[in-house]
Image (cartoon, rainbow, N blue to C red):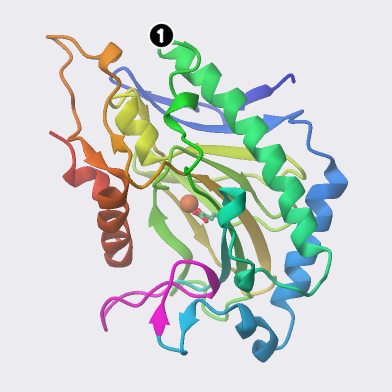
Amino acid sequence: MVLMMREASSGWPCRAGGSFCLCIQVDNHGIETSLMDDLINASREFFHLPLEEKQKCSNLIDGKHFQVQGYGNDPVASKDQTLDWLDRLHLRVEPEDERNLVHWPEHPNSFRALLHEYTLNCKRIKDCILQAMAKALGLNEDYIVTQFSNKAPTFARFNYYPPCPRPDLVFGVKPHSDSGVLTILLIDKDVGGLQVLRDGVWHNVPTSPHRLLINIGDYMEIMSNGIFKSPVHRAVTNAGKERISLAMFHGLDLEKEIEPAAALLHEKQPARYRKMKAKEYLAGFYEHFCRGTRFIDSVKI
Ligand SMILES: O=C(O)CCC(=O)C(=O)O
Ligand SMILES: [Fe+2]
């Protein structure tokens, strides 16, 4: 497979003191454009269904208790939490034998097969990019790929942003970085909204049909000991048009310890991040996300 990696806009990836804020656009990724279109259209059909139908895949148990998978909104941790203007469908797609199909829409009936096919393609692309990144860090080519056990979770999150009457008051998704190793993001091919923060300024990510956007996540920032930085990004809303994006989050086994790669450390370059299990990281990540802060800032040494 040949990957064309391009800087996401002039000046990216941004370089600051020997570190790279990595947000990469990928063309020629080998995924059939019809698969991408069919999957996004199937998810659009799902989001357009009546609420009672969508709630068959709800992320609330008994209408009350939040669980990570399913259709709905973010958990509400406190009364003063700022909520985002989106509906989402969040599904664990890997490990394949741990899929919980209760949350997977049955309508439209093409949805499940399309998501399965897209997941396989993303896995291939993820491995290819992670090998290139390991080499760029001077590590063994397979160092990062082998951090993923057969229990490593991948989540697909379909984000649906309805038109918003007051885009000046609310984000589609508030500023954050992604938690995992790497996110493969398919943004709406017509409607913009994604912005990335660089040197304190928000930059619009241009739409481009079938191009994938790769964001490295906080785990990768830690493993690279801060040489790669996870980009802070957000989605803004607009009053006129709905928007859909699909994020594939590639995470690590919850019991896995996340720490800077030993081969990158030496006396003059000690570890800059505390070691912790993925499950502890995720707990801290969600707590901070709800408050609009970043957990990674509190694991820096
Ligand atoms: O909708 C977008 O473009 C961004 C979504 C996003 O950042 C996420 O799902 O983590
Ligand atoms: Fe994100």
User: Where is residue 68 shown, x and y percent of the image?
Assistant: 45, 67
User: Where is residue 225 shown, x and y percent of the image?
Assistant: 28, 25
Instruction: Look at the picture and state if 102 lies above or below 236.
Output: below
User: Where is residue 34 shown, x and y percent of the image?
Assistant: 87, 48
Find the magenta span and give its range: 65-83
Residue found at x 62% / y 73% = 102
Instruction: Look at the picture and state if 69 lies above or below 37.
Output: below
Residue found at x 32% / y 60% = 286
Pointer 1 local density, CA inside 10 Å: few below 14, some 14–19, many at least 20: few
Q: Residue furthest right?
A: 34
Residue found at x 57% / y 69% = 88
Q: Is residue 7 visible?
A: no
Q: Main secondary structure of the magenta part?
A: loop
Q: Is residue 73 magenta?
A: yes
Left or right side of 207 for 176 = left
Q: Nearer the viewer, residue 9 or 229?
A: 229
**Disc 1 residue type (three-letter):** Gly
Which residue was labeled with disc 1?
Answer: 138
Which part of the image, by quadrant, shows the N terminus?
A: top right
Q: Residue furthest front?
A: 97
Q: Is mark 1 within 8 Å of ligand 2?
A: no
Q: Is residue 185 visible?
A: yes
Which element type, helix, strand or loop, lies under badge 1? loop
Which part of the image, by quadrant, shows the C terminus?
A: top left
Q: Quadrant of residue 66?
A: bottom left
Instruction: Look at the picture and state if 119 lies above or below 283.
Output: above
